[in-house]
Image (cartoon, rainbow, N blue to C red):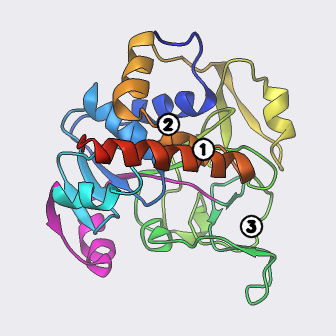
Amino acid sequence: MVPENPTPDEIMVFCIARQLQDGEVVAQGIATPLVAAAYLLAHLTHAPNLYFASAIGQSICRQPARMGITHIERLWLDLTLTNTTFVRVVTEILPSLRPKEFFRPGQMDPNGNTNNIAFGKNYQRPRMRMPGTGGIPDVTPFLGLIYLYVPRHSRVTFVPTLDICSGIGHNPARRMGQGPAYLITNLGQFDFANGQMRLTTVHPGVTPEQIQAHTGFPLEVAPDLHETPLPSPAELRLLREQVDPLSIRRLETLSGSERRQHLRQILTQERHIVADGLQ
């Protein structure tokens, strides 16, 4: 039996999945379970011919692996079509394949420029360092299919001016990069129709005023603003029972003790699954 309403993380998964088209090449980063769940959902529904350019082992896969934590690297590598090096991926494969990819920015300004390096303008002594950029500085100057997602919409992320810029947004004067095409958060969906972040849909129970209160700069609103379409019961069942039964996707929406507790639950459940031979 499927519960009555989708949760914010489930809405995000379905919104991301709807951005994918059959036959596309999608790039999967590391520790992005919301995006991974969306790719898998799209593969099982409307886009069975996706190619996965995975950061796990720098691999290209046609058949995706299931969601997991402790065995995820082996699962992906067992299904790979080819493996290569990070340098070759960034300089040769990604520019030629031109994949669609979802990044999670630590900071973002109104034009979609992003920061995944550190909070604080003193690079040598920042307030806090972030995980790093991966290939973001390499691909955003030329890749035209940049998509963004933010699991916790707040003024910490959406700022008028970045502390450090590590990803190129909409900057006509720079004559490089095309900027992000789309953004999804736990509160709504956005585009960059005028080169600036613009609200296009609000999730159920959320108002534009609430989103503005959680955004550190004036927010543009689309004239046809409407409520985000929700998944069907069948789609929810597929996500919860087949794509991500361990709810790994929720790790990106939680923090602190809640996140640690949920991670422990996932590891315990996954250990039982592996012990039972259901790999």
Where does label 2 land, which residue? 247
Q: Is residue 83 above or below residue 156?
A: below
Where does label 3 land, which residue? 162
Give the distance between the C-alpha atoms of the residues marked 2 and 1, in whole angstroms: 9 Å
CA neighbours of label 3 inside 10 A, class few (<14), some (14 to 19), many (20+): many
Give the distance between the C-alpha atoms of the residues marked 2 and 3, in whole angstroms: 32 Å
- Residue positioned most to the left: 81
Residue 127: assigned label: none
- The quarter of the picture where residue 75 lies is bottom left
Q: Name the residue: 59% across, 70% down.
A: 131
Question: Please, what is the three-letter code of the amino acid marked with disc 3?
Answer: Leu
- Residue positioned most to the bottom: 124
CA neighbours of label 1 inside 10 A, class few (<14), some (14 to 19), many (20+): some
Q: Name the residue: 39% across, 49% down.
A: 271
Looking at the rendered structure, the secondary structure element under dot 1 is helix
Q: Position of residue 104 (x, y in %)?
A: 57, 55
Q: Nearer the viewer, residue 82 or 224?
A: 82
Q: Indicate which label's residue lies in the foreground, 2 or 1.
A: 1
Residue stretch in magenta: 79-105
Q: Position of residue 148 (x, y in %)?
A: 54, 49
Question: Please, what is the three-letter code of the amino acid marked with disc 1?
Answer: His
Is label 2 in contact with label 1 (beta carbons under 8 Å)? Answer: yes
CA neighbours of label 2 inside 10 A, class few (<14), some (14 to 19), many (20+): many
- In the rendered structure, the answer to whether residue 57 lies left or right of residue 229 reads left
Is label 2 in contact with label 3 (beta carbons under 8 Å)? Answer: no
**Mark 2 or mark 1, which has the lower sequence index?**
2
- In the rendered structure, the answer to whether residue 258 lies left or right of residue 14 reads right
Q: Indicate which label's residue lies in the foreground, 1 or 3.
A: 1
- The quarter of the picture where residue 71 lies is bottom left
Residue 262: assigned label: 1
Q: Nearer the viewer, residue 258 or 64?
A: 258
Q: Is residue 149 visible?
A: no
